[in-house]
Image (cartoon, grey):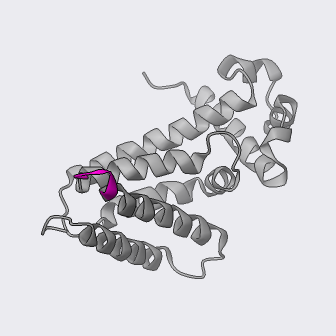
Amino acid sequence: MSEDKRVRRTKKLLRQALAELMQEKEFKNITVTDVVRRADINRGTFYTYYQDVFDLREKVENEMVDTLRALVDRSLLGGETGTMRSVLEQAVKYLEENRALTYALLSDRSLGSFEDKLMTLMEACSQKILPPKNRGDLVPIWFAAAGCIGVIKKWMIQDEAISKDAAIAQIDAILCGILHMAGARPGL
């Protein structure tokens, strides 16, 4: 069931407030009062959707990861071989559309971090493409996932020192190279 337009707007305002506040101070110092004042939302309205700022953050992270997972799954179903470009394009587009929140979440290392959730997602995606035969086969997957997240994070904070298309092309080439070296099937 789709959420009411007002509910989506309220949640968007709360996400934006959280992103702005996380860029100004450490997450552990952000209060519900800070968030509702920034979002210009009634405190009671906040509690309609979230228990506290930790719950807000957790739900925002999970929503973003779920959206990325769906984008990845759709891209992988497209059956494009030899490249991860379509997956990367969809993921980077989504992260870019949510740039402030993505960067704030990637920059904050408290809790079970957003970066860890993205690593888990990328590992699962890579394992769909190249199922590991043993635990040692996971090392290139971990390396590729960490590197990809690091490049995207660095790219997001730069003032477009490199174009999005160039960044995606380079990440694609590196990921495909790593997966190929790790013993990918001839299609990659």
Q: Residue at x 74, y 42 (%)?
A: 18
Vertical arrangement, residue 10 with respect to residue 82, above or below: above
Q: Residue 87 location, x and y as percent?
A: 34, 59
Asked if residue 112 lies left or right of residue 120, the reply is right
Residue 64 is one of the magenta-drawn residues: no
Quarter occupied by the C terminus: bottom left
* Nearest to the observer: residue 54 or residue 33: 54
Vertical arrangement, residue 98 with respect to residue 49, above or below: below
Q: Residue 20 location, x and y as percent?
A: 77, 50
Spot the residue most to the bottom: 161
Can residue 75 be seen here? The reply is yes
Vertical arrangement, residue 3 with respect to residue 39, above or below: above
Asked if residue 142 lies left or right of residue 157, the reply is left
Asked if residue 26 lies left or right of residue 159, the reply is right
Q: Residue at x 42, y 21 (%)?
A: 1
Which range of residues does the magenta coloring cover? 132-136
Can residue 9 be seen here? The reply is no
Asked if residue 79 lies left or right of residue 178, the reply is left
Q: Quadrant of residue 35?
A: top right
* Nearest to the observer: residue 111 or residue 34: 111
Main secondary structure along the magenta-highlighted residues: loop
Q: Residue 40 location, x and y as percent?
A: 82, 34
Q: Residue at x 64, y 38 (%)?
A: 12
Q: Quadrant of residue 150?
A: bottom right
